[in-house]
Each structure stands twice: as structure tokens, then as C-alpha cells.
Amino acid sequence: MNPSFPDPSAAIAAHVKQERDARGWSLAELAKRSGVSKAMISKIERAEASPTASVLGKLSGAFGLQLSALLAMAEQSDGRLLRYTEQPVWIDPETDYVRRTISPRNGGVLELLRIDLPPNARVSYPPDAFTVQHQLLWVLEGTLVFLEGEETHRLAKGDCLQLGRPVACTFSNPGDEPCAYLIALAKR
């Protein structure tokens, strides 16, 4: 993890507000579409609260965007090379899940992310968070239990899973050791 990376809350706040304004939605409309309370959306837009991964997933689904798009303003870079020390890192305030963007943010069609999921942590996303992308998930260390709709996948180090149709998903680490996995995203 890169502890010197700036807090992306302000950039996330600006992007959520920009997306809502671009659609002409009120706070109430976004709350209805996302299932996130008006109060929480307002706090996020004012950068008074750092959204959790689950909340970002709900907001991205309501906007019809990849979760990464909501973080894009905080992660912009130019060029084809993104050095490890410059890779954007975001930490979920609820679970301490760490999301590292590995690939340069230059508009390419492929995106690589490393996720470090602490022991006994779980993160859930609505189906809308997966509608605009294809995903591959590759476990680097530990054990990941991935609930994909009604189907449960127990993945160990080295296992790779291609996600199916967009359904509600939960990533969980039931063990006492950290779990790390790589996600490869491609736009649909």
C-alpha cells in the first residue's frame, strides 16, 4: 500500500455530484435509483463521508457506470506507464479492503486492479455494478469465497474465475489470513 497517496474523497465527491447533475437528478432521484439514502449521498457529495465499496457499487450501478468510473477522477494519469509508487490506492472505510489500480488510466479498454481483503471481511455489490464490464478474478493469495447470485465459488491461490451475467455479488474472506486477488475488467 502507498500511505502517501492522497485521500480521494474530494475527487469522488466531485464525480458523484457531476454524474448526478449531468442527468438532472435530485438527491431523492439518485437515492431511489441506488438504494443509498439522500443523507449519505449529500455527505458524500460534500466530502463529509468516505463512501464504502458497497455504497460506491450502488451509486455506480444507478449511473450505469463501472465502479472504477466513480474513482477515475481521483486516479487520472497520463501515458502508458504507471509506476508502483504512483498507483492509486483506495481503502474502504468500512472493511479496510484495499483497492490498487495497477493499469494506467489512459482510456484503455482493459483495467487491472489488485484487491487486498482483510480476514473476515466481506464486500457486496448490486447487479448494476457489473452491467458494463466483463470481469476475470484471479486469486493471488489466501482464500476467497465469491457469492455470484445463488452460486458460491470457493477460490484458492491460483484459481481464476470468469464472472457470468450481472447479478448481485459478494466477495468475502472467511479465513484468518489476508486474501489478495487480481481483477481484470474489460468494457462490454
Image (cartoon, grey):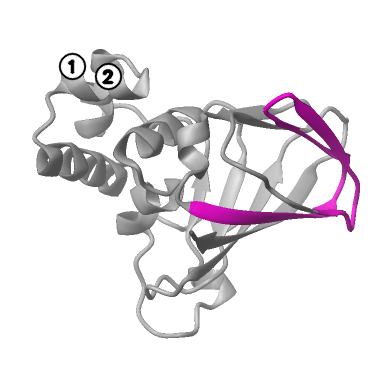
Q: Say which quarter of the image contains residue 175.
A: top right
Is any atom of residue 8 visible in this view? yes
Image height of 100 relative to 36, above or below: below
Tell me, for residue 31, which label it has, or none: 2
Q: Residue at x 42, y 30 (%)?
A: 58
What quarter of the picture does the N terminus occupy?
A: bottom right
Q: Amino acid at mark 2?
A: Ala
* Residue 121, position as x, y percentages in the image: 71, 28
Tell me, for residue 36, which label it has, or none: none
* Residue 45, position as x, y percentages in the image: 21, 33
Front residue of 83/154: it is 154
Is any atom of residue 53 visible in this view? no
Query: In 3D space, how far apart are the residues under numbered discs 1 and 2 (Cα atoms)?
Result: 5 Å
Q: Is residue 10 left or right of residue 86?
A: left
Tell me where the magenta segment starts and ends, as one range: 133-160
In the image, residue 8 lies in the stretch drawn in magenta: no
Image height of 152 relative to 4, above or below: above
Q: Amino acid at mark 1?
A: Ala
Label 2's element? Answer: helix
Pointers 1 and 2 in contact (CB under 8 A)? yes
Pointer 2 local density, CA inside 10 Å: few below 14, some 14–19, many at least 20: many
Label 1's element? Answer: helix
Tell me, for residue 28, which label it has, or none: 1
Hey, which residue is sitting farthest bottom in the picture?
A: 80
Front residue of 58/76: it is 58
In the image, residue 158 lies in the stretch drawn in magenta: yes
Q: Residue at x 50, y 84 (%)?
A: 81
Q: Is residue 158 left or right of residue 15?
A: right
Q: Residue at x 67, y 45 (%)?
A: 164
